[in-house]
Image (cartoon, rainbow, N blue to C red):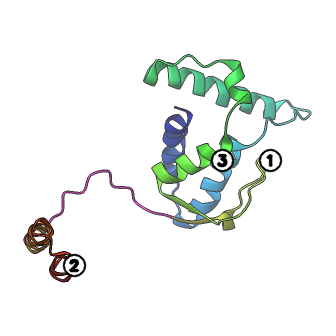
Amino acid sequence: MVVRAFKHIVRAVIAAVDDINDMAQSVASCLNILLGPFPEENNDGKCGEDHNLRQKWLEVFLMKRFGLAWKDEYSLDLRKYAILRGLCHKVGLELVTKDYDMDTPHAFRKSDIISIVPIYKHVACSSADGRTLLESSKTFLDKGKLEDAVNYG
């Protein structure tokens, strides 16, 4: 559920970027905010407010969208690498393969974002030739002719 909620935030950030050259930096900053550690408060208390806002938004979104009540102990058990993997899969992010230290406030940098690829859930493309080859291969397999099925399919 957390991945599904964070997906909406990342997509909103991607949609809000005006200059394509700022896309990687915006996505990296968003990932740092979502997956970063609880920030220590500084003199103005802004970091603590940001974390509380993120937490409150997540609670409200999960309740309204999925009917799930957020509990405080969930925050301690968040599997950040699993969330990151799910976000990359659902949003289409390609990141540099390396060990990310999720305990630092800036685990992601602009250079870590390789690309953003479009995600298509349902693609209804088919070709008559491909379908014919598949059916002929199935027919050869049913007859026990594996080599012909491989050659013609």
Is 111 positioned to the left or the right of 106 in the image?
left
* Residue 133 or residue 45, whichever sits in front: 133
- The magenta segment is 116-128
Image quadrant where one finds the C terminus? bottom left
- Per the image, label 2 sits on a secondary structure element best described as helix
Is 2 positioned to the left or the right of 38 in the image?
left
Residue under label 1, please give it: 105
Q: Which mark is residue 146?
A: none
Q: Position of residue 3 (x, y in %)?
A: 54, 39
Q: Nearer the viewer, mark 3 or mark 1?
A: 3
Is 60 positioned to the left or the right of 126 in the image?
right
Q: Which mark is residue 81?
A: 3
Depicted 114 relative to depicted 31: above or below: below
Q: Position of residue 77 (x, y in %)?
A: 70, 30
Tell me which label, 2 or 1, sits earlier in the chain.
1
Q: Amino acid at mark 2?
A: Val
Q: Is residue 125 shown in magenta?
A: yes
Q: Is residue 63 shown in magenta?
A: no
Depicted 54 relative to depicted 138: above or below: above
Write the residue at 49% across / 44% down: 12
How would you classify the magenta stretch by its main secondary structure?
Answer: loop
